[in-house]
Amino acid sequence: MSTADETLEKIKAQVEDETPDDITIASVSFEGPELVIYTPEAKEVATRDGIVRNLAQTLRKRINVRPTQDALVPKAEAEAIIEDTIPEDAGVQNLDFDGDTGEVFIEAEKPGRVIGRHGETLDQISASVGWTPEVVRTPPMESNTVSNVRNFLKQERNERREILERVGRQINRPKTADDDWVRLTTLGCCREVGRASFILSTPESRILIDCGDKPGAEGEVPYLQVPEALAAGPNSIDAVVLTHAHLDHSALIPILFKYGYDGPIYTTAPTRDLMGLLQLDYLDVAAKEGRAPPYESQQVRDALKHTIPLEFGNVTDIAPDIKLTMHNAGHILGSAVCHFHIGEGRYNVAFSGDIHYKDTRLLDGAVNDFPRVESLILESTYGGKNDYQTDQEDSERVLKRVINEAYEKEGKILIPAFAVGRSQELMLVLEEAMSSGDIPTMPVYLDGMIREATAIHTAYPEYLRESLRNRILYDDDNPFLAEQFQQVDGGEEMRQDIVDEEPAIILTTSGMVTGGPVMSWLRLLGGDPDNTMVFVGYQAEGTLGRQIQRGQDEITMSDKSGPRAERVSLKMDIETVDGFSGHADRQGLETFVETMHPRPEKVLCVHGDESSTNQLSSALYQKFNMRTFNPKNLETFRFV
Amino acid sequence: MSTADETLEKIKAQVEDETPDDITIASVSFEGPELVIYTPEAKEVATRDGIVRNLAQTLRKRINVRPTQDALVPKAEAEAIIEDTIPEDAGVQNLDFDGDTGEVFIEAEKPGRVIGRHGETLDQISASVGWTPEVVRTPPMESNTVSNVRNFLKQERNERREILERVGRQINRPKTADDDWVRLTTLGCCREVGRASFILSTPESRILIDCGDKPGAEGEVPYLQVPEALAAGPNSIDAVVLTHAHLDHSALIPILFKYGYDGPIYTTAPTRDLMGLLQLDYLDVAAKEGRAPPYESQQVRDALKHTIPLEFGNVTDIAPDIKLTMHNAGHILGSAVCHFHIGEGRYNVAFSGDIHYKDTRLLDGAVNDFPRVESLILESTYGGKNDYQTDQEDSERVLKRVINEAYEKEGKILIPAFAVGRSQELMLVLEEAMSSGDIPTMPVYLDGMIREATAIHTAYPEYLRESLRNRILYDDDNPFLAEQFQQVDGGEEMRQDIVDEEPAIILTTSGMVTGGPVMSWLRLLGGDPDNTMVFVGYQAEGTLGRQIQRGQDEITMSDKSGPRAERVSLKMDIETVDGFSGHADRQGLETFVETMHPRPEKVLCVHGDESSTNQLSSALYQKFNMRTFNPKNLETFRFV
Ligand SMILES: [Zn+2]
Ligand SMILES: [Zn+2]
Ligand SMILES: [Zn+2]
Ligand SMILES: [Zn+2]
Ligand SMILES: [Zn+2]
């Protein structure tokens, strides 16, 4: 009998001890970080007061109760009963039975109607069919990404179960080390923006946090080849934790599977989907630019298959001595501040990932309240001493003025923006400005991945700011579905038509004018002084966006499909509106640390240019008298 | 053809280019860090002006020229010629022909007579027999260690040649990394004295510096199991470099061979021999204390076999991008400050090992003059703010007074001392005091390993202080051979006889009264108030030496061979004479840094209690405005 089997035997005996005598426990098993209990009285266990809570407290594990096979009504029969029980207007789209877990996934347009008042309808279903109903919302906007991911995971259900069981055994392996230390190794993202990658290690466990690329420097990847990263084998790490989907944090995760990694990725569900979208796009871009991609789409699927989605606030065992809790980071959909609790109260480390401290229209501001925290790894993108930004309110006022002026000239307004996060924020600003009459209602064309990214946002309304969530969920007033938002899905012909029509706003990728549909728009709109280009995001040194912003009025666009380079004479109006960044500015970073509860002892400033990390590190030391560090890549810090 | 073979082909062509046309180059090969050139005209190449120097400069390698087989006179004939050529009074003990290298090792009591004026005799030998003569001194005191090591290496000559060739290929492998960094990882010896172990690494190469135990804490060994140490396999390190033989630096080196390491150990020849002696004793002690030894004597032999001895000042390639130069550290025989030159002028790191800054009777003070140095890893044993010690002159005066007082009482003087270093220093002090009449001439009994350690010292006179070396080599006045020094080789019976006789001094191990013959002496001498015990070395917390020094007058000595514990009532006089330490005191450490040339940018203070490393680090920062660090174990510092 393996040690994992022995552990399970012991747990089963404990579960039997702790449950009333009339409940039969058929078996227990690990499923990733959760403990699954199979019983013919699943419904009874799940609903009777305190049983599950008591078990969770005693076993210090998340508990999942499932019916045994003999408790399940046959599928065809169950299907009929379920369809009869759920009201017509719930808009049920699909029923999907998982015979192994006894779960039935009910996809519906209105999950609330499936659940019923106080869960009555669900209770009725599980009582009459034995299956455990799980409700899935039909996304209000169709997203290929979301449905592809869901279908793929359904199709890979069997392998996924094996992965989860293996991960569960790993997490619950007995602790062996008698030593006691906590260390952080920097594999990237120090004194630079990009290639985020860190290893948090103890004598028991090793966790890789993020694994991104460095925009504009394809050769500079995380130092995965050094001994403290993967030298002891790709499975010498227990888990990968991903703070958010941006490529500077996620791009190189699939390469781990190419190297043979076979363990879990912990992140939020929306990050999982956005990560898949962005990684596939990353491969596309590499192919288009003639670079050998570092991995194949197969490894993107591997990454999806190994992802264990976590909800904000859930404390999850990810290694024998490490618990992870994710909290909203306010940066993009699903972005998380990752809090690691090590040992039994031994040490606590929070990784900020990328954060936005204040609330925006799209997301709540970053969480900075934790049960305990000794060390903080803090992003420093705007950590420089002059990196203060305009308030969003002021920025919105400026944006509306710029749009009104352009509209009066009967021109088009071209806004390059990142597909994930900034585009949705702008859509909300534009929608409100139009409905309040601050700017005239006119078409807003979405080009590139923006529509798809927006659809993913609407598939996860619980991650959006409360007021927005309520509009989407309950008021049937989804601002992203406002009729002025129109997808550019007709290629160059449609773009030409748009140019020939009335004034309009065009939101398009890429955000730094480094490729993508914005290039077409520049060709079509650039020559007319009645048109206006508005920059709303950071334009990095070396990008075409930065050159235009600085006043360059003749640009050369090389056509990748042929040898000819085209010169475009820019006559359109160029405007910059500050304050829509997804990152906390210097003030936001300071306030995040100042109001953090509890106060961290140490702060390591990363994810910023050398001057930014340096200046933020000095400022935090001087203002708050904390021990601060400005790490280099490839260093190891010992916390305990 | 392997890349190493290609490299050799290229080098051979270069050698042919650079040598006069009348010289035939038969072949070239690597032998550890050296390049060996085989030629029928070996003598010609070796002696004709500038050939070897020119080759060494062009190839940037140490060059060894050897005759081809056809140039060698048959052994029997050569033996006769050599015996005829060397004058009788040279005291030739042995001739040893190595057919593979064409070397003949001539062991003689008076090497100078073998060499002849300006090397005339040697020249004559090589001209007439073709073999290259190498002169080895017959140790003036017979040392089992030295002769065992020499015999063992002779017997393993073939495997040793294989090892050297493999090491040579490793060193001369092409550089592959396009990255560029220098890092130091601490595996032990930080904020503690003991388990010295560091990894110096670049993208090309990884060097392990020292691998010791922690006295008094057997369980605390270097962190070899962390990924950055040996996770990528025992041969992921290119080389081991050993600063000196003390067990807190060398004890765990043989375990590397148990793990499968098969690479070189670079150290001085005396350190190699002392290391073998101390490691075998380490195994003995473990066995006697009933602990499972971490390795077998076979691995001690493996370590010897893989050792490549270096001379002070010789710049040696030890990896594709790392050159090592050892310099006298003044601490014990063969102890070295290790200087690493990385890349072509990229970075320079000096490891102090353990140092004594001032000259002593035995050794010159530590070298602190280097071509370049950016970072210094500095021992801090006496780095505490009050760790100033008496001058040796004053200490000697006190010691002589104590001895005279004891002599007047007609008692015995018991001095516990470390076998290596401190004992020899005391022997020199006592010998001079007796010959000058400062103390009466009386027997000085050497018990434990002291005599053997002394014999090793006399086998390497070139490592001793110049005046002492000259006395041993040329004046036939070896102070260690003074007749008052007598070995205790008769066990308890002899000890009892000594007790019953006239006043005498007893120098004995262990230095901190933690076992060994000093325990017998305490039993025999402790009860008589006419006897005196003199502490001359540091007594660590927790040792019996420390307890006695603090005034405890009844001690319990447990007999490992049985259950009975013996109580001894101490009535003997207890004295402490400071100032004979092998370590620089606080002043010495400061001066070492202050006068170091060039001035280092960074100093990492290690090998000291937490308060010592901390106080030294602060002091060096404040006084000399250097960047100083007080590292913890298991951290990684990036220098470049
Ligand atoms: Zn981001
Ligand atoms: Zn980022
Ligand atoms: Zn030492
Ligand atoms: Zn030492
Ligand atoms: Zn070997």
Image (cartoon, coloured by chain):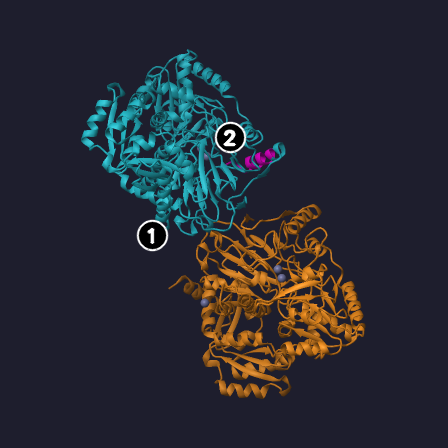
Chain colours: A cyan, B orange
Front in this rendered view, residue B552 or B93: B552
Image spot of residue A437 (x, y percent) = 41, 11
Front in this rendered view, residue B119 or A593: A593
- How far is the residue under mark 1 from the one under mark 2? 43 Å
Front in this rendered view, residue A580 or A140: A140
Please give the name of the residue rendered at 56% of the width and 83% of the height, measured from the top-left corner.
B94
Q: Can you say whether B139 is above or below A405 in the image?
A: below
Q: Which residue is mark 1?
A: A1
Q: Secondary structure at mark 2?
A: loop
| Residue B594 lies in the magenta-colored region | no
* Residue B106, image quadrant: bottom right
Q: Can you say whether B119 is above or below A238 in the image?
A: below
Q: Which residue is mark 2?
A: A369
The answer to whether residue B456 is left or right of residue A124 is right
Please give the name of the residue rendered at 27% of the width and 21% of the height, measured from the top-left corner.
A90
Which one is earlier in the sequence, the residue at label 1 or at label 2?
1
The amino acid beneath tag 2 is Asp
Chain of residue at mark 2: A
Number of numbered callouts drawn: 2
Where does the magenta region start and end?
A607-620
Direction top: furthest residue = A437
Image spot of residue B628 (x, y percent) = 63, 48
Dominant secondary structure (helix, strand or loop) of the stretch shown in magenta = helix
Please give the name of the residue rendered at 29% of the width and 25% of the height, measured from the top-left corner.
A122
Image spot of residue B180 (x, y percent) = 50, 49
The amino acid beneath tag 1 is Met
Image quadrant of ligand 4 equals: bottom right
